[in-house]
Amino acid sequence: MLRRWCIVSAMVALTIGTALTATSASAAGYGGYFSPGGPIHLVSSNAAHGHGLSFQAESTNWSGYAGTTGTYKSVSASWVQPAGTCSRGDQYAAFWVGIDGYSSDTVEQTGSEVDCVGRTAEYYAWYEMYPGPSENYSNTVRAGDHFTATVTYLSGEAFSLYIADTTQGWSHTTDASLGSTPSLSSAEAIVEAPCCTAGGGILPLTDFGTVSFTGSTANGSAIGSAGGLTEIIMVDSAGRDKDSISALSGGENWSATWLRSS
């Protein structure tokens, strides 16, 4: 997922459920408008051995697991929305599943977020067909809510994006068109520090404590058996880890623990 300055293309979407509003919150102190979503900012990728991994990658905005060498038509995972610890300044953290974005310029994704606006934590859920704009769902999201999300390729340029907050008792299925032919070249479950500062850099990562993902699948099977399984580590400009990623358990379950904002 990527935060960016402007809406760069239009999107045709049919939403089933509560009405949506486009994200246009100002990143206070960073001089621009932003929305969650977008491709990886890859630093490096190397062959890996052991734990079922094909590659280990470093990124300035993503951490988590992805299948990166197959054709992917579905991805799914569940997670518990972590609480944001907001001590100073504005910070941002998103949790999502998606198709594409690792080796392509489009991403089809849905997830939740906790942003610090000063000392106040704000929670919400959204979807995005990048490079189209992200759209927020208007439903209540709180720390501790249990989410399940799935992105499914339908045909042509069409996808179905499902997200459910089973704690609050709401869900949405959104059928949307990308507006171009999708690559279908990766499937991922991700923690993200969104983009961008005035200079195009990554925004500070909210202290989210630990978030646990369960049931992470690609093409209906455990993501651990996905082709080209890639472990992605988020790093800052000095190469320091911004969070730590656990090994996959049962091929589907893992956690991320916050280490630093930037």
Image (cartoon, helix red, strand yellow):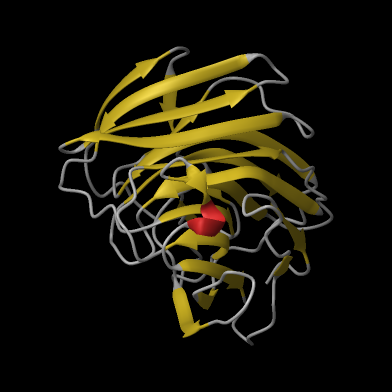
Question: Residue drawn 63% across and 53% down?
Answer: 92
Task: Check the image and report above or below for 164 versus 194.
Answer: above
Q: Can the viewer see residue 195 in this picture? A: no
Q: Is residue 43 left or right of residue 259?
A: left
Q: Is residue 178 left or right of residue 203?
A: left
Percent across and percent down for residue 201 are 50, 71
170 w.r.t. 183: above or below: above
Is 114 on the left-hand or right-hand side of 125?
Answer: right
Q: Kindly identify the residue that appears in the image at 69 percent across and 82 percent down.
A: 240
- In depth, the one of 114 and 162 nearer the eye is 162
Q: How many marks?
A: 0
Q: Is residue 248 above or below residue 253?
A: below
Measured from the top left, where is residue 101 in percent x and y?
Answer: 37, 59
Which residue is at the front of the view, 124 or 108? 108
Residue 79 sits in quarter: top right
Q: Report which quarter residue 214 is drawn in.
A: top right
The image quadrant of residue 12 is: top left
* Residue 249 seen in the figure: yes
Question: Which quadrant is the C terminus positioned in?
Answer: bottom right
What residue is at 54 percent from the left and 39 percent from the top?
A: 111
Give residue 34's position: percent from left, percent from top: 46, 50
